Amino acid sequence: AQSVTQLGSHVSVSEGALVLLRCNYSSSVPPYLFWYVQYPNQGLQLLLKYTSAATLVKGINGFEAEFKKSETSFHLTKPSAHMSDAAEYFCAVTLIIQGAQKLVFGQGTRLTINP
Amino acid sequence: DTAVSQTPKYLVTQMGNDKSIKCEQNLGHDTMYWYKQDSKKFLKIMFSYNNKELIINETVPNRFSPKSPDKAHLNLHINSLELGDSAVYFCASSQVLAGRKDNEQFFGPGTRLTVL
C-alpha cells in the first residue's frame, strides 16, 4: 500500500534559516507526491507536486522539493524562512480509485519560525 | 468568488443530535471529497463522489451519509452525533483527468465540529 511518513511532528527554525521538512514514501509503483500547507484555521493549499517530469520541483512561496528514488524521499526545503511560513505542512501520495483520486497524507509537520 | 466553500464554519452540538455540513465548488470539477482532520491534525479521506456517484467510502460509520445533489455540491449529514465525531471536516474538489495522477485537490476552509 502506498503511504508517506513525515519525520518530525514539529520543526522550529529561526527567521532567515534553512527550512527542511522530511517526507519518505512507500510505494510499489512510481508515486505521485504532493506537499500541502495549512495556515492556522484555514484549509489546505498546494505547495508543489512531483509528477515524474523533473526530480527537483519548485513550488510557491520559495519552496522546493527533490524526489530521490534511492532514498524514497521527497523532502521540502526553503533557503530562508519567513515568519509567514509558520504553518502545518503535509506530505501526501495519491491513489486513483475508479476515477477518483485519493490523497493519503502523512502525519503533518508543524513549522514554527523564531524571530 | 470562493472556489470551495463550506457552511457552517463552526458547529457546536449535543451528543445524539443530527447535523449537516454543506459544500459547494464553483470550479467546474467533477469529483468532490470529504476529509476528516482529528485533534492531532491527522487527515483522512472519508468519501469521494465523481459526477454524483459515490466512488470512495473509507469504512466510515453509516451514521455519516454524504449526498451529492449535483456535481457542484457535496453535503455531509451525520446522525446520532458522538463525542468522537468532534473534528474539522474538509471538503475538496478536483478534476480527475484520465490517466493522470497529479490532479490538484482544492480544499474548502473547513468546518470545526464540536460535540458536547
Image: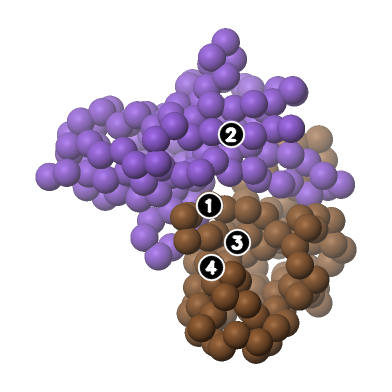
Chain colours: A purple, B brown
Question: What secondary structure is marked by label 2?
Answer: strand
Q: Position of residue B96 (x, y in %)?
A: 75, 47
Q: Quadrant of the N terminus of chain A?
A: top right
Q: Hey, which residue is sitting farthest top in the picture? A: A70
Give me the chain letter of mark 4.
B
Give me the chain letter of mark 2.
A
Marks 1 and 4, the one that precedes in the sequence? 1
Dot 3 amino acid type: Lys
The answer to whether the residue labelled 3 contacts the one labelled 4, judged by CB atoms less than 8 Å apart, is yes
Specify the quadrant of the image occupied by residue B101.
top right
Q: Position of residue B67 (x, y in %)?
A: 79, 75
Q: Residue at x 69, y 32 (%)?
A: A2
Q: Hey, which residue is sitting farthest left in the picture? A: A115
How far apart, in angstroms, are the residues tagged by discs 2 and 4?
22 Å
Query: Which residue matches tag 1?
Result: B42
Q: Is residue B81 above or below residue A67?
A: below
Q: Quadrant of the C terminus of chain A?
A: top left
Q: Position of residue B79 (x, y in %)?
A: 72, 82
How far apart, in angstroms, are the residues tagged by discs 1 and 4?
10 Å
Query: Is there any visible trace of residue B61 in the rendered image?
Result: yes
Q: Position of residue A111 (x, y in %)?
A: 32, 43
Q: Is residue A73 above or below residue A2?
A: above
Query: Which residue matches tag 2?
Result: A4
Camera-side residue of A18 and B14: B14
Dot 2 amino acid type: Val
The circle drawn on residue B87 is 4
How far apart, in angstroms, are the residues tagged by discs 3 and 4?
7 Å
Marks 3 and 1, the one that precedes in the sequence? 3
How far apart, in angstroms, are the residues tagged by discs 2 and 3?
18 Å
How far apart, in angstroms, are the residues tagged by discs 2 and 1?
12 Å
